[in-house]
Every structure is written in structure tokens, then in C-alpha cells.
Image (tube, grey):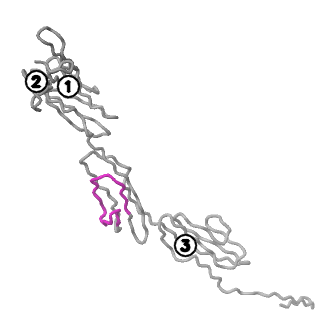
């Protein structure tokens, strides 16, 4: 450049460099699976970088959906690019671990629109019917993404024994019906809620057992007995193996038992507190006549 003013001349030179277009590409808008991480890289030689997150590094890690941009400065030139990042969330829930009562069933629902399913036994339906205890899981897939959930199903079964197998109740006898099931509560047919029921007469007795949110019923029918013992009026201790021992036979539960045998003069020949122990017709090892 040359200038002329009042006969004076001056000259100066400046060099202008026109840079070509500087490429900066973050890539196409993208969709990631939940839990994935996308690394955005500003692949350009520049003096400075500024990201939408405030970072000034050459790259950032993206773990949340949103619009991300970067501006690169090279000398007096600036270039920028923007990318939209979304995450595909597959939303379903098998629920909390569950305790069912004996005989119940439940349906696990993993339904997601346009999804595929794979359950622990290989079935591929969106729902699964549970009829027994176990660990159940499903993998749900959509657009190349997968989510997994699991649930534990337990069962409360009927206790093995609730009421005893009594059949008779004798005069002046007291029977206690006591289920003794840990953690249970009870409702008897008379409306009482005690842990045991005192029974003094024949009849039908029923109890409802409440255990872990489940209910189980049991009943017992007690018939009257004239006597709790059948006592024969004769026996034949002749050693032939038939009716050789004098025994009494309980026809209901015996709590206290005592049998004594006397001779005609009132002498004690035999005594026992065990109904299964009888008299063989001997006294002091000798057979009586």
C-alpha cells in the first residue's frame, strides 16, 4: 500500500491469510441406551474450546439427555457444532418381593410397547403367571436396548399340624386345644382369640389360624365316651399266647392311670401306672391258682 500527501510518500505491507472452512463435527443426533456413556470429541486443531457444559477440554462424557454444543477458536476464527443426545428408557417393574398364601397365584407384568421379552424359563410373553415359590426375572428389549428386573416369590403353606387327632372326651376330662404355631394368631369358633382353648364337653371345635397374612382352618369333633377305659372281665394266663395278660384298653387320651389287682383277702398282687403294662396272673414270680 502506498500513500502520497504533500509530496511525501509512505508505503506499508500487510499479509492476509484466508483460512479454508475449518471442519468441526460432533456427529449426528443420537439415541443411547440407559446407563450408556457417549464421548463427544472436538476433533480439530484449535487454540481454545468451550462446551455447553462449561468444560474447556477437547472432549466431554455425556451421561444425560440434552443438547450439547462446542465452540472452537483458532486465531480469530470460531467454529461450532451442536448435537442432540437422547436416552432410551425401558420402564417396567416386576414389583417388590412377594409372599403368597398356599393355593394363590400372581401375574408378573413387564409389558412395554414394541418390546421383546425373555423370562428365566425361556418364555417370551409380556406377562408370567407364578404358581410356586422361586426367583423370577425377565429381560426386556427395545430398539437394541435391554433392561432387567427380578423378584422373589415366597409361599406361606398350611402348617403340618394344627389341632390334635382327638376323638373322644370323657366325663370330667379337660382337653386343651393348643396349635402352638410360631408367629400365628387364632380365632376359635366361640369368638375367643387365645392361643389355646379349654374343652370340657363333647362337640365340634374349629380354629382359624392367621399367619403372615394367610388364614388356615382346622376342626375337630369330640364324641362322648362312657369311660376312657375298656376293662375285660376275664383273661386266661395259660401260656398259649392268647389273652394271657390282663390289660385295660384306653379309648381316649389318658393323662393319669393307675391299675391295682387284689386277691380276695385284700392283698395287693399287682399295680401299674402304664396302661400298656398288664398283669400276667403271677405274684412274686409264681403262677396263682
Residue under label 1, please give it.
277
| Image height of 103 relative to 26, above or below | above
Element type at mark 1? loop
Q: Determine which of the numbered discs, if any, sits on residue 83 in the image.
A: 3
SS at badge 2: strand
Residue 126 image point, x, y percent: 31, 63
Query: What residue would you read off at disc 2?
Result: 230
Residue nearest the observer in this picture, 110 or 260: 260
| Residue at the extreme left of the image, as rendered | 233
Per the model, the C-alpha gap separating discs 1 and 2 is: 14 Å
The residue range painted magenta reads 117-138
Say if the magenta span includes residue 136. Answer: yes
| Image depth: mark 1 or mark 2 in front | 1
Q: Position of residue 192 (x, y in %)?
A: 24, 25
Asked where in the image residue 264 lies, by quadrant, the reply is top left
Residue 251: name its quadrant: top left
Amino acid at each position: 500500500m502506498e500513500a502520497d500527501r504533500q509530496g511525501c510518500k509512505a508505503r506499508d505491507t500487510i499479509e492476509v491469510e484466508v483460512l479454508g472452512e475449518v471442519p468441526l463435527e460432533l456427529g449426528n443426533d443420537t439415541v443411547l441406551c440407559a446407563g450408556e456413556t457417549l464421548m463427544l470429541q472436538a476433533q480439530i486443531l484449535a487454540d481454545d474450546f468451550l462446551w455447553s457444559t462449561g468444560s474447556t477440554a477437547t472432549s466431554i462424557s455425556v451421561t444425560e439427555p440434552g443438547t450439547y454444543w462446542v465452540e472452537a477458536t483458532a486465531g480469530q476464527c470460531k467454529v461450532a457444532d451442536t448435537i442432540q443426545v437422547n436416552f432410551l428408557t425401558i420402564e417396567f417393574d416386576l414389583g417388590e418381593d412377594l409372599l403368597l398364601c398356599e393355593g394363590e397365584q400372581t401375574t408378573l407384568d413387564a409389558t412395554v410397547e414394541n418390546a421383546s421379552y425373555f423370562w428365566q424359563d425361556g418364555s417370551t410373553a409380556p406377562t408370567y403367571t407364578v404358581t410356586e415359590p422361586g426367583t423370577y426375572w425377565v429381560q426386556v428389549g427395545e430398539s437394541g436396548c435391554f433392561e432387567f428386573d427380578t423378584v422373589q416369590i415366597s409361599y406361606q403353606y398350611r402348617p403340618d399340624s394344627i389341632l390334635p387327632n382327638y376323638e373322644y372326651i370323657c366325663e370330667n376330662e379337660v382337653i386343651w386345644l393348643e396349635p402352638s404355631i410360631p408367629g400365628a394368631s387364632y380365632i376359635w369358633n366361640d369368638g375367643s382369640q387365645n392361643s389355646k382353648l379349654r374343652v370340657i364337653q363333647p362337640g365340634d371345635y374349629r380354629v382359624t389360624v392367621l399367619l403372615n397374612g394367610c388364614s388356615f382352618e382346622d376342626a375337630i369333633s369330640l364324641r362322648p365316651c362312657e369311660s376312657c377305659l375298656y376293662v375285660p372281665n376275664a383273661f386266661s394266663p395259660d401260656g398259649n399266647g392268647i389273652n394271657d395278660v390282663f390289660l385295660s384298653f384306653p379309648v381316649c387320651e389318658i393323662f393319669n392311670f393307675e391299675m391295682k389287682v387284689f386277691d380276695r383277702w385284700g392283698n395287693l398282687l399287682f399295680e401299674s401306672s402304664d396302661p400298656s403294662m398288664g398283669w400276667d396272673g403271677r405274684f412274686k414270680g409264681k403262677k396263682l391258682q
